[in-house]
């Protein structure tokens, strides 16, 4: 299983760009946003790519604990949404990978500075 991709904020475009249908037929999404956003993201991604999404909705802290527990055998592909501190801790511990969107240059300067 691929190492978990770190995303603080995302969009359907970013998720679509990060997973290619040529090598993936399903995506495991850990979602720490509101349930309705998580469901919408999963359905929209499936519709846009044809890739099945297995979405689990948990708080940021619960997801961080799960990712830490799975460190030797990661199960997830994308962690989307939630508060910043658990994402930063996971990155600091080497549990997640940085993701740079090909759409990054379309962001405002202030957003690029934070990305």
Image (cartoon, helix red, strand yellow):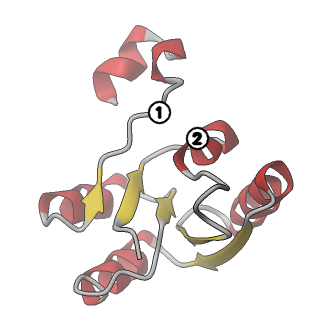
Look at the image and tell me in which quarter the N terminus lies.
bottom left
Q: Position of residue 101 (x, y in %)?
A: 47, 33
Foreground: 34 or 13? Answer: 13
Foreground: 84 or 95? Answer: 95
Mark 2 surroundings within 10 Å by alpha-carbon count, few (fewer than 14), some (14 through 19), many (20 or more): few
Mark linked to residue 28: none
Examine the image and state in which quarter residue 111 appears: top left
Residue to which mark 1 is pinned: 101
Left or right position of 56 against 101: right
Q: Residue furthest top?
A: 109
Left or right position of 27 against 48: left
Residue located at (38% from left, 43% from top): 99
Look at the image and tell me in which quarter the C terminus lies.
top left
Against 87, is 62 above or below? Answer: below
Residue to which mark 2 is pinned: 17
Residue located at (66% from left, 37% from top): 13
Residue located at (46% from left, 23% from top): 104
Q: Are marks 1 and 2 in contact (CB under 8 Å)?
A: yes
Examine the image and state in which quarter residue 45 appears: bottom right
Foreground: 24 or 103? Answer: 24
Mark 1 vs 2, N-terminal side: 2
CA separation, marks 1 and 2? 7 Å
Q: Position of residue 49 (x, y in %)?
A: 77, 52
Q: Residue furthest front?
A: 22
Left or right position of 10 against 64: right
Helix, strand or loop at mark 1? loop
Q: Position of residue 48 (x, y in %)?
A: 81, 48
Residue located at (38% from left, 66% from top): 4
């Amino acid at each position: 299983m691929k190492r978990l991709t770190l995303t603080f904020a995302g969009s359907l475009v970013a998720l679509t760009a990060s997973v290619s249908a040529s090598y993936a037929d399903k995506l495991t999404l850990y979602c720490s946003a509101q349930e309705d956003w998580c469901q919408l993201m999963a359905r929209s991604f499936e519709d846009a790519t044809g890739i099945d999404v297995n979405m689990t909705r948990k708080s940021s802290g619960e997801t961080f604990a799960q990712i830490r527990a799975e460190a030797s055998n990661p199960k997830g592909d994308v962690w989307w949404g939630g508060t910043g501190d658990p994402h930063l801790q996971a990155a600091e511990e080497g549990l997640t990978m940085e993701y740079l969107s090909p759409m990054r240059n379309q962001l405002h300067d202030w957003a690029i500075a934070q990305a």
